[in-house]
Image: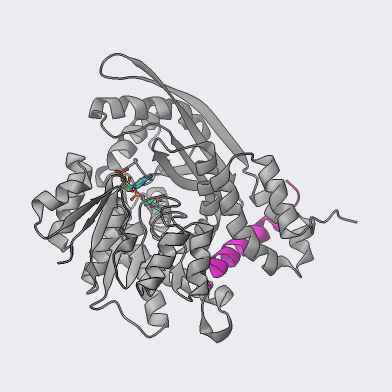
Amino acid sequence: MAVSDHVDLETFMAGVEKRNPGQTEFIQAVREVAQDIYEFIDDKEQYHAAQILRRIAEPDRVVSFRVCWEDDNHNIRVQRGWRVQNNNAIGPYKGGIRFHPSVTESVLKFLAFEQTFKNSLTGLPMGGGKGGSNFNPRGKSDAEVQRFCQSFMTELYRHIGPDTDVPAGDIGVGGREIGYMFGQYKRITNRWEGVLTGKGMEYGGSKMRPEATGYGAVYFLNNMLTHKGLSMEGKTAIISGSGNVATHAAEKIVQLGGKVLTFSDSSGYIHDPDGISQEKIDWVKHLKTVKRGRINEYVEEFSGASFHAGKRPWEVSADFALPCATQNELNGDDARMLVKNGISAVAEGANMPTTLEGVKVFHDAKIMYAPGKAANAGGVAVSGLEMSQNSERLAWSDERLGQSLTDIMLGIHEQCVEYGNSEGGYVDYVKGANIAGFKKVADAMLAYGVM
Ligand code: NDP
């Protein structure tokens, strides 16, 4: 008779905590998923007997390595790099690379775990992975970033490949960093192959990739509104972050007739009561990707706007909130303030930006709440399509990619409704995303047997 892991949720979580001491973000992410999966698999002995959840919550492997580079003053600098390959049951590992001083093994393990469910939801054949380093690109010269990226790839190339593991960008890794890393991979291996996504258009990148995460999050928000017979027209939104996801989310909200009031970075947030127009969004994109400046410069450029140092934008009243900066940036108190101010929907562009307590506040108040693994899946979806284009040696049109992104986000919404619908018509999007994402990966793992 098979040994079942039919232990209760708290015993399961105690085991996760024991095996991953101090890895708070990873433990938080596993708990959020486990509480829904436990309910779903309660009467499905095959998943218990095969210990599926226990196996998904144990990465296939975690590679950690030294990244040594020389700064402009000829000092030798030593950083740590990682690649977490969480699960490849349904396709090659896929997930971004993050360069930020807050990166730890726990952060990357949580991101790779979440990515496994997100990638499954897209319907494309992609497993879950994530990588990065505690390197801080802020304030570094182009030459320093180039030397760091080359050194990082000099180790990473051993662990990735177009059918093995295909990284992309994330916080601190945009087009510039992907270019340096792809160039180094090509130089070391003497192969041009689709080993990274988010590449430049000149060398195998996909149209719509830069826009896909932010646009996709707003499509998801729009799908939630349509499901309730509502629309975006004339509504206001507060957004955190001012990077790739935040600026593209803002762009799509403006295109759909909404008004964006805020952007932020780690130094504080700006509030523009007149609304952040397309022209202003373009200015922020230039500020962040070309000038590499700070968001407080916005108030010097646009009168009527105010800067709030050291704060997050959740105190500003609006119809929608889109956290698009980083994990755990919206806590229980923030969520209570948003509810008090009359927020009607929250769509996460970032990964796990809301704490478990914050999520509970939204659910208790019956707010439409879309977790990152569903709402921000548009980015990895178009990354998956970039892989297809590289394999075909073809470049798809804007129209085809735009339509694919719209269809994929609609498909994710439908899966969430299928598994997350509860009494009274309230959709628990967290539960829906967790169960739909889990089922496909779990069934593939069952097919493979014990490994
Ligand atoms: P960027 O590096 O382009 O922008 C990140 C933004 O978040 C910056 O404004 C940054 O400010 C801010 N930020 C980062 N860390 C913190 C912090 N600790 N506190 C406050 N603000 C912070 O990254 P992306 O826009 O690509 O990513 C944003 C989020 O979206 C991340 O959670 C990422 O994992 C997620 N995501 C991204 C995808 C993509 O396609 N890019 C795909 C799916 C999810 P500062 O400059 O001050 O650091």
Instruction: Report x, y in % for residue 172.
Output: 34, 40
- Residue displayed at 40% across by 42% down: 196
- Residue displayed at 63% across by 65% down: 36
Left or right, residue 231 beside residue 121: left
Specify the segment rendered in magenta: 428-451
Give the quadrant of the N terminus: bottom right
Left or right, residue 256 beside residue 23: left
Left or right, residue 181 beside residue 9: left
Using the image, determine if residue 38 lies above or below residue 50. Answer: below
Left or right, residue 164 beside residue 295: right
Q: Outermost residue, right direction? A: 1
Give the quadrant of residue 257: bottom left
Which of 117 and 308 lies nearest the eye of the viewer? Answer: 308
Instruction: Report x, y in % for residue 197.
Output: 38, 46
Residue 123 seen from this side:
no
Give the prevailing secondary structure in the magenta stretch.
helix
Give the quadrant of residue 262: bottom left
Q: Is residue 442 magenta?
A: yes
- Residue displayed at 30% across by 58% down: 313
Using the image, determine if residue 220 lies above or below residue 157. Answer: below
Which of 268 and 19 lies nearest the eye of the viewer? Answer: 268
Give the quadrant of the C terminus: top right
Residue 249 seen from this side:
yes
Q: Is residue 446 magenta?
A: yes
